[in-house]
Amino acid sequence: MPDDATARRRAGTGLGLVLALVCAAVLLTAFPHHDREGGGRCAPRTLGSWTADTTLDAEFTRYGDDPARTDDWTGGDGTHSVRLPDGRVLWLFSDTYLGPVHGPPNPIGESYAWRDLSTPLVRNSGVVMSRAGRLESTLPAPLFPDPAPGRWRWPVAARVEPRSPGSAEQVVRVLLWTRTTGTYPWVYGVPAATEVATLSLPDLRVESVARILGQRQITDPSRRVLFGTTAVADGKWTYVFGGDDARAAARPASRAYVARVERGRLAEPTAWRYWNGSGWISRPRPTAVLGDGRGTGVASAFTVVRDEGTYVLFTMAAGTPGLTTVTSYWACAPTGPWHGPGRGLRAPLPGGEVAAYNPQAHPELSGDGRLVLSYDVNWLAATGGAAQVNLSRNVSLYRPRFEVLRLSRG
């Protein structure tokens, strides 16, 4: 009997251990590993308040309108930025106007600075800001040359990272979207590939361009994924987000995807790992982490920041008329699940038939609970002669606007 009692106690102890392990497994299933990356610091984030960043707005106006500059940046979109090790900020733009700007009034008597219709337009540019926050110079443009006739490169997110893992030498890695000339609805080009350029420091010379992920084998252009609209560092990883062009095919919203790369290896195609819904794989067949094709989703260009343990995504709102409202989502890990959309920011816009697009966060200019966010402004009919006339007679239309956001927790 004593032996039987001991055996029963041992069996009970073993059963209790099994039940504890089962309960732990259930909890781990309820909170999968990629949701726990944010740890206990992850909590909901919503847009609390915003005010115009008049200092940054005025600085871009000063630089762009300076009549002494005859071949520098006067306007552009696709606004991205990266803080350099010496404290300067490199601003990267997609389509860019160069050349002189004439003071107001313009030729039809309006009180706007203006540019000639013959003003050069290049596919990309880089502008350098001093540590003190003063725009100083435009790098020779285009900074990233066209890979072939009818193809061009738009720079997106950029990171400073070691030349290779563990290296003391740092370089700037700039993600590039390669597009090719297309017909309607691909008036902004057909998605072709994701590339990464390496820039030397401190002179910002383009050393090389590496092809990361080609997309021409995917016959439906609306399902091609370009990575690099935003990148977030977390430990040894850089999480690189991308999107498809579903909106160009008249779908309500595009979908968001994510890859990750070890710091120092952004320019190595074999180092990239793509989220496929259950794990990180080397084969480039990503699964969307956000976007149901109806009420949730992103524009093809969006931005993500990390606020303590929470990831916050900003994008133009899906399913709303026009391009006027920036909305947000939050998640405890880059792979989601993403919660939202949350409260929207109605982007202040100048008068006329204009639109806001491409919201981008600038963490290197943020701090003390402030998050600097830019959005681009363009004429609604962004192609054709009428658009060019309107963008030329009022140069402020094709420049970024800046807002200072504060996030609410819980």
Image (cartoon, grey):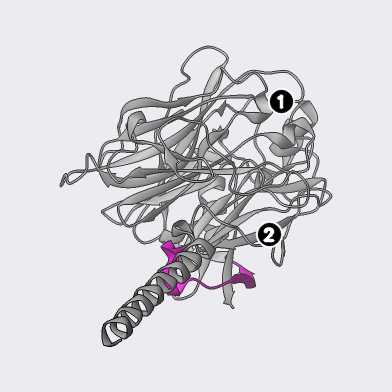
Determine the residue positioned at 77% across, 26% down: 385
The single residue placed furthest to the bottom in the displayed view is: 2
The single residue placed furthest to the top in the displayed view is: 149
Above-or-below relation of 102 to 42:
above
The local secondary structure at tag 2 comes to strand
Task: Give the percent coordinates (x, y) of residue 96.
Answer: 56, 34
Task: Give the percent coordinates (x, y) of residue 282.
Answer: 40, 33
Q: Is residue 42 visible?
A: yes
Asked which quadrant contains residue 190, the reply is top right
Asked which quadrant contains residue 10, the reply is bottom left
Task: Assign the N terminus to one quadrant of the image.
Answer: bottom left
Determine the residue positioned at 33% across, 83% down: 9
| Residue type indicated by callout 2 | Thr
Q: Which mark is residue 187?
A: 1
- Residue picked out by circle 2: 327
Density class for disc 1 (Cα within 10 Å; few <14, some 14-19, many ≥20) is few
Q: Is residue 45 magenta?
A: yes
Measured Cα–Cα span from mark 1 to mark 2: 25 Å
Which sits in the foreground, 377 or 318?
318
Above-or-below relation of 176 to 158:
above
Task: Give the percent coordinates (x, y) of residue 45.
Answer: 58, 70
The range drawn in magenta is 36-53
Determine the residue positioned at 76% across, 54% down: 324
Task: State yes or no: discs 1 and 2 in contact (Cβ < 8 Å).
Answer: no
